[in-house]
Image (cartoon, grey):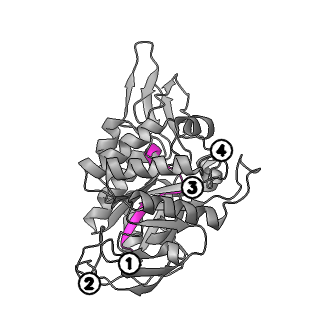
Amino acid sequence: MTTHYRGRFWHRREDGRVVCDLCPRDCALGDGQRGLCFVRQNVGGEMVLTTYGRSSGLCIDPIEKKPLNHFYPGSSVLSLGTAGCNLSCKFCQNWDISKSRDMDTLTTAASPEAIAGAARRHECKSVAFTYNDPTIFAEYAMDIADACHERGLKTVAVTAGYIHAQARTEFYAKLDAANVDLKGFSDHFYRKLTGGRLAAVLETLEYLVHETEVWTEITTLVIPGHNDSDTELRAQCEWIVERLGPDVPLHFSAFHPDFKLLDIPPTPTATLRRAREIARASGIRHVYTGNVHDVAGDTSSCASCGEQLIVRDWYTLLRYRLTATGACPRCATPLAGHFDAQPGDFGRKRLRVVV
C-alpha cells in the first residue's frame, strides 16, 4: 500500500508554495518540504499525507484508558495511531511516536477495512485514534471511521483539539466521542510548553459540545509548577461550567517526567485530589483523577442524589448500578453519557492486535 495519499485540507499560493489548512500552524511548504507535524508534505505542488495506511500501536484497551468514563463503560476499544504531531509539547508522554521520523520502524501497513475488521473480530465496541494526534492523519482516520460505522462500530478521537474550523467540521462528523486534552488554561502555558495557542482548543471544545453529537470529555495533565495553581485550575473549571456546561466530564491526570521536561517531579496524588475538589466546587458534576490509584477519584456518582453509580479500580468496574436506560436506580436521574443496558467486562487488560 502506498503511504503517499493526496490530502484534503490545503491550498496553493501564487508563489507555488502549498499551505496546509488543517491546523492553526498554516504551514507554507515548498516542494519536498514537510510541515511541523512531519507527515504532511508538498510533493509536486500537492499536499500529501505520508502516513496513510500506516498504523502504530494497534492494541485493545479498556475505554476508560482513553480516558472516557461515560462512553460505554467496561467496553473494549481498538487503539491506533501513526506518527508525528502538530504540537511540540515538552512534556509529551508518547514522544517516541509523536516525534518519530522513522515510519518504517514504528508502523505497520493497515487499510481502513483491515482495522475495522480486526476490531469487529475482537468484539470491540469502538476504535480510537490516539497515541499521536489524529488531527494530522485526519483523512486516514475519517476513512477508518467510515469502515467502522459500516460494521456497527463507534469511533473515538483522543486529541489536543488543535484544528481549523473547516477541517474540524469534516473530521468530527465522522466521530462518536472525543477526549480533548486541555493542556493548561493560559496562552503563556500553551506558547511556552506546546508551541500552540489556547484559543483554538477552546473553540474546538465549544464546537464539539454545542454543535455536534460527539460525546466529549476533557483531560488535563497536571504539571507541578506549570498549570497546577488554584487560580488557573479554578479559572479553567469556571470556564468549562459557563461555556460547556456542568455535565462534561473532566479528568485530571498525573504527570511523570518525560521527553524535555525531566526536571519536574511527578504529580502528587494530593494535587490531583485538590484539583478535583476545586472542579467540584466550581460546579463540574463529574471529575476524575488519572494515572494514580484512586478509587474515589474513579467513581461516577449521581449528580442529583450522590449515589455511587460506577465504582472503578483502575479500569476494572467494581460496581455498576445504572438502570438499563442509564439512570440512577435511587432517584431516576439520567447519568450524562452513552451507556448500554449492561456494561462491558473487558477490565484492565491490554491485547496487541495484528491486522
* Residue behind mark 1: 123
Q: Which residue is mark 4?
A: 90
Mark 4 or 1, closer to the camera: 4
Q: Would you identify the image quadrant in which residue 352 lies? A: bottom right
Label 4 secondary element = loop
Residue indicated by mark 3:
221
Circles 2 and 3, Cβ within 8 Å, touching? The answer is no
| Left or right of residue 227, residue 320 in this image | left
| Kind of residue at badge 3 | Leu
Nearer-N-terminus badge (4/2): 4
Say which element carries label 2.
Answer: loop
Q: Amino acid at mark 1?
A: Glu
Nearer-the-camera pick, 57 or 184: 184
Q: Residues within 10 Å of mark 1 (few under 14, many from 20)?
A: some
Q: CA distance from mark 4 to mark 1?
A: 37 Å
Mark 1, mark 3: which one is toward the viewer? 3
Label 3 crowd bin: few (<14), some (14–19), many (20+), radius 10 Å: many
Separation (CA) of disc 4 from disc 2: 44 Å
Indicate the secondary structure of the residue bearing disc 1: loop
Q: Secondary structure at mark 3?
A: strand
Q: Residue 341 lies in magenta, yes or no?
A: no
Amino acid type indicated by mark 2: Thr
